[in-house]
Image: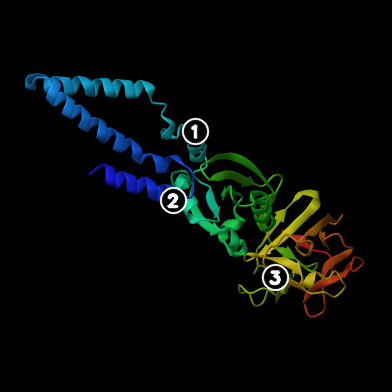
Amino acid sequence: MLILPSACYFLLVAKMAVYKTDRYIFPVYAVVLTWTVCLLYKLGRRLIQPQYQYTAAAVLLSITLVSGWKLCTWDYLYKDTEALLRTAEGYGDVDCVYIYDAIWKVRPSYYEVSKYNSVVFWNVNNMDAIRSQDYCMDRELIVCILNSCDQQSVLNELLSFCPFLNTYDELGGYAYATTYHLYGDNVEASLHHIYSSSHMQEIGCMNMDEDNGNNVCLVDSGTEIMEVCYESEGYVTLWIGGQVLDVKGGRFESGSNIQLFDYNGTKAQRWRLQQNEDGSVTFFAGNSDLIMTYDETGNIILGPKDNVAYGKWWIE
């Protein structure tokens, strides 16, 4: 009963096991223990008188338990996870994104990610789909990445389309994954109305939807609230309804339309803010000398920086 199943198991595992790892060897201990108990039972029946057999079994069990306790190294209590779990509890109000390439490697992280506010699992081959998610607008984010993924590339890509995040710290790692804390360093954001020079109209969009390419234009005053993300080096990103003001096609030419587009961190979406003496501001497109202005129809476009009449804006 013992020999045949044991032999079949070890022959099968030796043939098909993917890794040389402890979990494939563990069953041998149950087999050895069963053999030992059977042998001791046979010896006890022959060598020990019946009235002492229960006492001998209790003594033998006590010796086994005590020696096992003293000799055991407790390798499989996974005490190295304690620090990471305590750290995770400190970020209980932060959302988590888990990037994986093989779903079976994710399981050891379940207890850790349960500590965070929420967790979403994304395959590393589907990173582009993250751009449209609400948590890309978070001021901080926990990211768990499997070690088999290109972690640096994943982090760089996340930072490229999360406007309020520009740096990260490593919190720790366990099993197949490493955990990072992404946050914004010297990045601030606030809600504003951005009025034209006449204060009669402001920057907005007439046909808001989720598609890219909707033209930005002047709308009635007080109807549109923009989120202005202040970055380092004097740059800002201008948000309306989850999309940003973008130079159409990346063409830095006079007359180019300004459109709403998904955030991608390119120069076409970065504006250099210049404060004017009268309290107004001018938005320069990227590193160019062209500014955000508008034409007679109210369509917002790029124009030369000497267009004083239509090139000044008021942030309130």
Q: Earlier in the sequence, mark 2 or mark 1?
A: 2
Please identify the residue farthest to the bottom as the structure is shown: 297
CA gap between label 1 and label 3 equals: 47 Å
Residue at the (26%, 34%) spot, across then down: 35
In the picture, the quarter occupied by the C terminus is bottom right
Residue of label 1: 80
Q: Secondary structure at mark 2?
A: helix
Would you call the spot at circle 3 few (<14 residues within 10 Å), some (14-19), or many (20 or more)? many
Residue at the (12%, 26%) spot, across then down: 45
Q: Amino acid at mark 3?
A: Leu
Q: Name above or below for residue 306 compared with residue 13.
A: below
Residue of label 3: 260
Q: Secondary structure at mark 3?
A: strand
Q: Amino acid at mark 1?
A: Asp
Residue of label 2: 15
Q: Secondary structure at mark 1?
A: helix
In the picture, the quarter occupied by the N terminus is top left
Q: Amino acid at mark 2?
A: Lys
